[in-house]
Amino acid sequence: MIPTWAQIGYLVSAVCFIVALKALSSPRSARTGNLIGAAGAVLAVIITFAAYKPDHLASILIALAIGTVGGVIGSRRVQMTQMPQLVALFNGVGGGAAALVALVELGDVPSDATVAAIATAFTVLVGAISFSGSVVTFAKLQELMTTRPVTFPGLPVLFVASLLGGIALAAWLVSDPRVWVGVLLCLIGLAIGVMLVLPVGGADVPIVISLLNAFTGLTVAAGGYVLGNTLLLVAGTLVGAAGTLLTKLMADAMGRSVFNILFGAVRGGSTLGAGTASDRPVISAGPEDVAILLGYASKVIIVPGYGLAVAQAQHTLRDLVEELQSRGVKVDYAIHPVAGRMPGHMNVLLAEAQVPYEQLREMDDINGDFKTTDVVLVVGANDVVNPAARNTPSAPIYGMPILNADEAQRVIFLKRSMRPGFAGIENELLYDPRTTLLFGDARDSLTKLLTALKTV
Amino acid sequence: MTESIALLTIFVLAAFVGVEVISKVSSTLHTPLMSGANAIHGVILVGAIIVTGAADSAIVVIVGLLAVVLATVNMVGGFVVTDRMLEMFKGPGARKKELHK
């Protein structure tokens, strides 16, 4: 039995986690909130050592040190542009850890404790799904594999069969908790995770990360039930519930349903898009022409996208905007909720370049302004201004709210090539007679624009 | 009240708290919030330490230690990367730090 002081300590940790989540919901308190969460976690670990007096102490401490070094190096070294996949990876290892804990616990589950056995089976299965699913999302975001939906004939049948097999194995495990059945369940969970994420298109992957995050939360909660540990139960449930809501909020921001994201490609409901560069005529121009368009405008809106981040051009963009403002041009940044790779990702990237927070305007706030805007400068973005989301019901992004860049007088795209965006679909706006394209690496183009702007 | 009912009660109440605390978040903070929540479920580390500490066979110890490593990566990495993201939202202080790099 755990001593009372340890129970109370766990309660303090749990409160820390609740306060942390609350504080993370507001920009002012977010950083403090994260630190409070970390403090709660450290407290929980210390209490665990003191209360349970675990054997194999030296090995555990070494394992802790290895994990700490790995986690710190990974999160310190990563480029801000690659952060979504890192979060996916961290989530995956958490799910994996939960599955392993439950596997180990299998040996100790009494045969009459049905609920505990169900919770164990759940943790093994869902933890494994979360692990392998996260690995696939990592591979997609890191572009180790294609970002387009992957399906093959028979995938739905195989998926449903695996799911049924998983449930059957879980039921077996509940009636007869044997370790090898647990291992089998774990393997089937891994397969289900892969099949769950493969058909998801690149643009939807962030929502899947959030969903898997909620899954891992629930597995941790179930693990807490198995171990009779209230802290794991509370923390896991908090994350599970908050993660589920967050997944829904993100999906809403993209105008998609979670079901459609997961199973859209499998059902054949979404077309996979052209995917190749088209040779239709476009209007392209040099930096000088574009600089004149910008320099003599009275109102400009910047639409930044992932291409900006990849080129590390945030700082150059800020310089360009400051130059325009010094000429009396009114400039705003229009931030699509999913600009970058995840909701809020672009805000992080621009904040890194010290763009003042007030200049970043959210979609609903700025969408009415495009009609009265002279020039929209789209830097490394594509899908978020693609009118197909409004007009083409067959497009995979149909229904996603977009920035109304097409309502402005002129649109300028800074693009590397005519390759379609992350969602893999053509953008009609590129062929619009009011659109001008400036080809090249975003940083390069912005530097040239800045130089040209100083002379016009 | 039996223990399982107590645990069930905690589960249901925690679920409501989880939904309530983040119901009014702007999309700007979706990414750090997801990352922070991700770090919190790293407390499975507590579970990993408990099972490893109670293990009596070598194979169980090895599996348990693997769980400890994975859970620590999740927890420590999660909090550090969230802090890095949120650092960007700061004002002049962060700017100064950037210049010193």
Image (tube, helix red, strand yellow):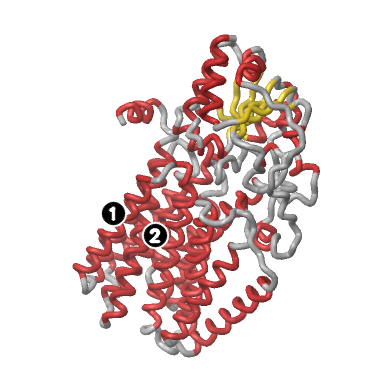
Q: Which residue is mark 1?
A: A69
* Residue A193 image position (x, y, % from top left): 55, 68
Question: The C terminus of chain A appears in which quarter of the rendering?
Answer: top right
Query: On the image, which quarter does residue A344 sit in?
Result: top right
Q: Residue at x 60, y 49 (%)?
A: A250
Q: Residue at x 43, y 72 (%)?
A: A99
Query: For this rendering, which residue is in front, A404 or B24?
Result: A404
Numbered mark located on residue A38 in the image: none
* Residue A163 image position (x, y, % from top left): 60, 76
Q: Is residue A256 above or below residue A103?
A: above
Query: On the image, which quarter does residue A402 sit in?
Result: top right
Inter-mark Cα distance, 1 to 2: 15 Å
Label 2 packing within 10 angstroms: few (<14), some (14-19), many (20+): many
Q: Residue at x 49, y 71 (%)?
A: B8
Label 1 packing within 10 angstroms: few (<14), some (14-19), many (20+): some
Q: Which residue is mark 2?
A: B42
Please indicate whether residue A324 sits to the left or right of residue A152 in the image.
left
Question: The N terminus of chain A appears in which quarter of the rendering?
Answer: bottom left
Element on which disc 1 rests: helix
* Residue A315 image position (x, y, % from top left): 47, 27
The answer to whether dots 1 and 2 both sit on one chain is no
Q: Chain of mark 2?
A: B
Please indicate whether residue A182 sits to the left or right of residue A264 in the image.
left
Amino acid on which disc 1 is placed: Val
Element on which disc 2 rests: helix
Query: On the image, which quarter does residue A329 sit in?
Result: top right
Q: Is residue A304 above or below residue B25?
A: above
Q: Is residue A286 above or below residue A181?
A: above
Amino acid on which disc 2 is placed: Gly
* Residue B100 image position (x, y, % from top left): 30, 28
